[in-house]
Amino acid sequence: MTRSRSGVPGPEPAPSPAEPLRLQVLTGLPLHRMATTGQLRPMLRPNSPRQLISRVLNKLRTTGLADLTPLQQADRSRTHAWYLTPNGIRLTRDLPLLRGRPPYPITSTTAASLKTPHTLCVVRAHLPFATDARRLGHEHGPWDWTPEVAHPIGDGQRLVADAVLHYTHVDSQHRRKLRAFVEVDRTTMSSERLAVKLIDSARLFHHETQPIGRHRPASTGPAWLRWYPVFPRVLFVVTGATRARLQDRISDLQAMTAQHPLVAALAREVPLGAAVLEDIEKHGPSAPVWVPLARGDKRPWTSL
């Protein structure tokens, strides 16, 4: 992982075709938890045939380093989600790109099947950002997306973001390093529970590090400065329901932003937005498909 001068993890370069594809797959699977062949191809080798990825995956399965779990498809087509086995995890745990990443939670076929729907949806949310970055000449690749990032927010509780996004926006004059907490909602929880995630983000924003010791001096400042030079923007990606229902969920997020004092204070300092996953996939996240939670017209995520 590259680091900026501040010591905070920075965007990683996109995979080079010169790097062994086997190594890229062994890195990409544990980093993203699991993925389908159709997801790994645009992530790692967008201009290569699907069969190239399939051959590598099948060989990893033959050697006991990877396995698969079947997916339920409406059209009954044969699709599988791939993940690393415990042997594969032991082999890859010391890879430089995986050091310091959250622990790999999939240790069996049962664990894989339970996590498949949400995990693959989080991968779906990542792919449009990677595709957009390649098209626009920005810096963002498969290694710039870290799932299941946890931070303490006080009282023994934690904020667990579905993913943290690192992205460098590049134009002829400027380089903007952007970060975001990404929450992916498949409409499987109540709208209120989803909106509570905004409160957790606000608690992290206001949470201060308390020194350890008998005679504790004043707080040493916001805890999030341990990881980020600027507090990440918060992006909600919603899917899995009718357009009207998804709009209702976004409206509930806007209501929480307006009504909760901690979240309102967060919104004055940090960009907050929501978008429909299918819109991001169709138009790209740089299109004006993001609804600002503090109200306003739709815009690109970089302009929230």
Image: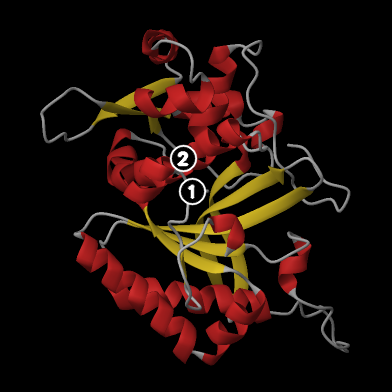
* SS type, badge 2: helix
Image quarter in which the C terminus is found: bottom right
Is residue 189 shown to the viewer in this render?
A: no
* Residue 144 picture quarter: top right
Which residue appears farthest toward the left when viewing the image?
Answer: 75
**Residue at position x 58%, y 47% in the image:** 102
229 or 62, which is in the foreground? 229
Of the pair 296 and 263, the residue shown nearer to us:
296
The reply to whether residue 230 is in sight is yes
Badge 2 amino acid = Pro
Instruction: From the viewer's side, name the closer residue of 147 and 69.
Output: 147
**Residue highlighted by disc 2:** 128
x then y, percent, for residue 206: 67, 81
Q: Residue at x 30, y 34 (%)?
A: 109
Q: Is residue 159 left or right of residue 191?
A: right
- Left or right: residue 101 versus residue 107 is right
Residue 243 position in % (x across, y down): 23, 61
Q: Position of residue 301 (x, y in %)?
A: 54, 57
Q: Is residue 75 above or below residue 262?
A: above
Q: Residue at x 67, y 28 (%)?
A: 95
Which comes sooner in the sequence, label 1 or label 2?
Answer: 2
Element type at mark 1: loop
Spatial separation of the CA atoms under disc 1 and disc 2: 7 Å
- For the N terminus, the image quarter is top right
Q: How many marks?
A: 2
Which residue is painted at 74% across and 64% down in the image?
230
How busy is the neighbourhood of tag 2: few (under 14 within 10 Å), some, or many (20 plus)?
Answer: many
> Which residue, given by chain and number where applicable, does mark 1 sit on?
285
With respect to residue 99, does 79 lie above or below?
above
Q: Verify CB contact (< 8 Å) between mark 1 and mark 2.
A: yes
Callout 1 amino acid = Pro
Residue 168 relative to residue 22: left or right: right
